[in-house]
Image: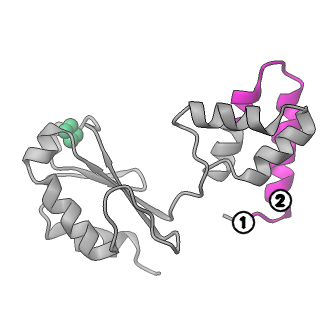
Amino acid sequence: MSQGTNTREDISDIIKKWKKVEGSLVMMLHSVQSRLGYVPRWAAMEISKETGIALAKIYEVLTFYSFFKLTKPAKYQINVCIGTACYLKGAPELLKAIEKYTGLKDGQTSEDGKFSVMGLRCIGCCGLAPVISVNGKIHGQLKAGDIKTILDEATKGE
Ligand code: FES
């Protein structure tokens, strides 16, 4: 996502809106993350400058809550369920096939920011095990051989 003028203006608007509300740091950070997909350092610095809250305090909050992301999410976020049902039905083979396609193991992001691979605990679709999601879209009852088709489809036009 661009960090151009509009983005900076949006973030500045978010800060202006929330800084009037006492104790709104977490809400402000949520708004930034929903706009950008993460909370970049420049936005944290802007918040600190505008609100007077120390940067260290802002990072304390950002690192306390695991839902805040400090790095830009990959363009294609591949989540692999490694909960019990999915694991027993072949999640390890799916991870291997994903590694073959992307070069990435569980927990890694490619240097170009194109792919990230993350193993998650049960995502609530056990009836469809084994399950992966690509940018939130669920694919179930998979075999390792399906991975290439899914990722080719998700990235087509690249
Ligand atoms: S264990 Fe994978 S969805 Fe429940």
Q: Please provide the residue range marked out in magenta.
A: 2-29
Query: Can you say whether 154 is above or below 134 in the image?
Result: below
The x and y percentages for residue 158 are 47, 81
Q: Residue furthest left?
A: 88
The N terminus lies in which quarter of the figure? bottom right
57 or 94: nearer the eye? 57
Q: Residue flagged by tag 1: what amino acid is it?
A: Ser
Image height check: is 36 above or below 121?
below
Residue 2's tag is 1
Asked which secondary structure carries label 1, the reply is: loop
Query: Is 46 situated left or right of 57 in this image?
Result: right
Decide if residue 32 is on the left or right side of residue 8: left
Which secondary structure is most common in the magenta stretch? helix
Q: Is residue 136 left or right of residue 99?
A: right
**Disc 2 to disc 1: CB gap under 8 Å:** yes
- Please give the name of the residue rendered at 78% of the width and 19% of the height, measured from the top-left corner: 23
What residue is pinned by disc 2?
6
